[in-house]
Image (cartoon, helix red, strand yellow):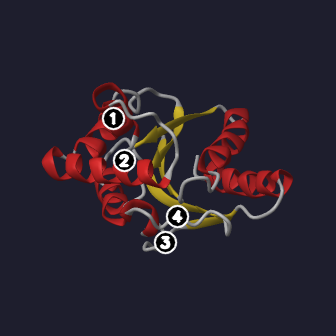
Amino acid sequence: MNIVVVINGTGGSGKDTVILNCKKYLLNKNILVGNYSTVDVIKEIARNYVNWDNSKTERNRKFISDLKKVCKQYNNMPFNDVVNSINSTKTNPENKVFFIHSREPEEIQEFIDHFNKDEHVEFVKTLLVKRKDHIITSNDSDKNVENFKYDYIILNDTDLDELNTKCKKLSKELIEYF
């Protein structure tokens, strides 16, 4: 069985920390975890061909957002890259949760529509990770993260122990589907 969780949140909100916390609970139940991002292939292009330095300045965030938008319009590369990566592993018999980082509401819906038709995926859920002190509006990708109706929202405004408790609760809900 496979589950897809499309995860979103502005830069620095704690998405990877949430995934790492969920992963330890899911692995304890023999559920494998994949972590994919629609922006990874864009960052690779920027590093290799534009000499982008990977720093998280507002200028660089806007550049990556704009480059992703162009690649999406040209041939939907960010979406296709993630789908192809997941397709290469999802037919194995193990139980898996695939986390997909995607910021744009249209793309989130595209993943939902795609994987809801996939016979190897049981269901698709959406997750927003929020932090009050991490609001980014310098680019279209970050400023539109809340323009979607998410299945789960994790507020990451407290200490790591409380965040871990929230991740444990989410993991238990996901485990129930297996």
Q: Are marks 2 and 3 in contact (CB under 8 Å)?
A: no
Q: Give the spatial CA distance, label 2 vs label 4.
A: 14 Å
Left or right: 101, with 112 as reference point: right
Say whether disc 1 or disc 3 marks the residue closer to the N-terminus: 1
Q: Nearer the viewer, mark 2 or mark 3?
A: 2
| Looking at the image, residue 44 lies above or below residue 166 | above
Total numbered circles = 4
Q: Nearer the viewer, mark 3 or mark 4?
A: 4
Q: Could you tell me if residue 145 is visible in this image?
A: yes
Q: Give the spatial CA distance, label 4 vs label 1.
A: 21 Å
Say whether disc 2 or disc 3 marks the residue closer to the N-terminus: 2
Question: Residue 34 in the image: x percent, y percent?
Answer: 51, 35
Q: Secondary structure at mark 4?
A: loop
Q: Give the spatial CA distance, label 1 vs label 2.
A: 8 Å
Using the rendered view, name the quadrant where residue 19 is placed: top right
Question: Residue 96 in the image: x percent, y percent?
Answer: 52, 37
- Amino acid found under the numbered disc labelled 3: Glu
Mark 2, other Cα within 10 Å: few <14 / some 14–19 / many ≥20: many
Say whether disc 1 or disc 2 marks the residue closer to the N-terminus: 1
Say whether disc 3 or disc 4 marks the residue closer to the N-terminus: 4
Question: As rendered, which of 148 and 13 lies closer to the eye?
Answer: 13
Q: To which residue does mark 1 refer?
A: 46
Q: Are marks 1 and 2 in contact (CB under 8 Å)?
A: yes
Q: To which residue does mark 2 refer?
A: 64
Q: Secondary structure at mark 3?
A: loop
Q: Could you tell me if residue 122 is visible in this image?
A: no
Q: To which residue does mark 4 refer?
A: 136
Question: Residue 50 in the image: x percent, y percent?
Answer: 30, 32
- Amino acid found under the numbered disc labelled 4: Ile
Mark 4, other Cα within 10 Å: few <14 / some 14–19 / many ≥20: some
